[in-house]
Image: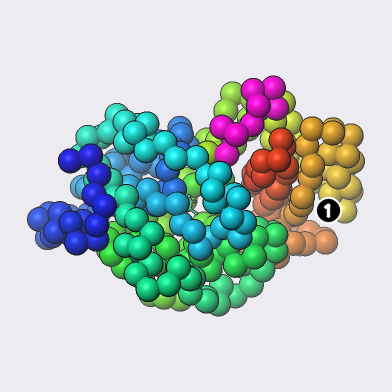
């Protein structure tokens, strides 16, 4: 069995597991890479049984062409998952299996976490993410679920979702995996030309310098520096660079002692939108 397409077949399979099985889930949209592989490895280490879902969720795309262009590499995905463990169960539902009546998202109150950065530039994106993650948790009932820190804002919102909807799943964030030049691994990197992909190490290098500057200079100065760096590099267009505290994700103007901060960036390269983030202290 390579993958399971229906909820019924998945439930049947999960029911056959011993009662106390610790079940881990890694939700994905496919087009898998080493970043995903690190989540699968961790999930396999920490659970008796692991489900990986592959589903390109339409309600989290605010742009149809982005949805259409999303890479689909199912055969290679299955190979990669099974190279980590042949026992991982792969769930590949169709859209009608997940959205039986209408392809619409629920409306959640994420206490403002969804109003900044990605939420500001991608209308309704996080309601779509919340809808699919809640659906998968309800169908699969995992004890733990694994998400990458590359989508740090998504990770915070999923923690919140689990809390407000009382889903009873332990959310585990996993470190960003980077290409050799520092570019954060992403399924979208495949859409970059080889030259731009190589040059895109510039994004992480800028973040590292910003982190260094944040140690001694003001928030404003750090942001101005990044803006100028990107203005001087025609290959990359800066959409936003924000410094936020890690609990509320509210962009700050001034730093307060004893508070943990993170920097977030979104950049266009070759018409491909890339995001990244870094802990500042
Ligand atoms: O990060 C992703 O790939 C997606 O947003 C997720 C969490 C699988 C939901 O579709």
In-front residue for pair 271/16: 271
On the rendered structure, is 86 left or right of 198? left
Magenta stretch secondary structure, dominant: helix
Q: Nearer the viewer, residue 203 or 214?
A: 203
At horizontal 74% and vertical 62% (from top left) the residue drawn is: 251
Residue 61's place in the image compared with 237, above or below, is below
Location of residue 78 (image quadrant): top left
Q: Position of residue 9 (x, y in %)?
A: 18, 56
Q: Which residues are magenta?
A: 188-198
Q: What residue sits 24% from the left and 57% below the top? A: 6
Which quarter of the image is occupied by the N terminus? top left
Query: Which percent across, then down, holds residue 95?
Result: 38, 59
Mark 1, other Cα within 10 Å: few <14 / some 14–19 / many ≥20:
many
Residue 206 seen? yes
Q: Is residue 2 above or below residue 27?
A: above
Viewer-closest of 19 and 103: 103
| Front in this rendered view, residue 95 or 147 | 95
Instruction: Judge from the rendering whether residue 259 lies leftward or rightward of residue 98; answer left or right.
Output: right
């Amino acid at each position: 069995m390579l993958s399971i397409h229906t909820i019924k077949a998945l439930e049947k399979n999960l029911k056959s597991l011993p009662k106390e099985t610790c079940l881990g889930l890694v939700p994905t949209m496919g087009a898998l890479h080493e970043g995903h592989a690190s989540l699968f490895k961790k999930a396999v280490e920490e659970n008796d049984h692991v489900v990986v879902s592959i589903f390109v969720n339409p309600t989290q795309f605010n742009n149809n062409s982005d949805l259409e262009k999303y890479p689909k590499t199912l055969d290679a995905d299955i190979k990669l998952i099974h190279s980590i463990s042949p026992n991982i169960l792969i769930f590949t539902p169709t859209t009608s299996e997940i959205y039986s009546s209408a392809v619409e998202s629920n409306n959640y109150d994420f206490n403002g976490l969804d109003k900044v950065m990605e939420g500001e530039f991608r209308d309704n994106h996080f309601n779509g993410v919340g809808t699919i993650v809640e659906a998968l948790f309800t169908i699969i009932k995992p004890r733990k679920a694994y998400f990458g820190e590359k989508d740090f804002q998504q990770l915070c919102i999923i923690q919140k979702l689990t809390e407000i909807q009382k889903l009873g799943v332990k959310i585990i964030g996993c470190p960003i995996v980077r290409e050799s030049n520092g570019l954060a691994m992403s399924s979208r990197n495949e859409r970059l030309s080889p030259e731009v992909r190589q040059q895109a190490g510039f994004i992480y290098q800028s973040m590292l310098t910003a982190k260094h500057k944040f140690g001694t200079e003001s928030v404003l100065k750090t942001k101005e520096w990044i803006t100028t760096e990107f203005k001087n590099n025609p290959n990359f267009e800066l959409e936003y660079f924000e410094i936020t505290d890690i609990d509320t994700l509210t962009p700050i103007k001034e730093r307060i002692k004893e508070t943990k901060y993170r920097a977030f960036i979104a950049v266009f390269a070759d018409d491909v939108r890339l995001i990244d983030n870094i802990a500042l202290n």
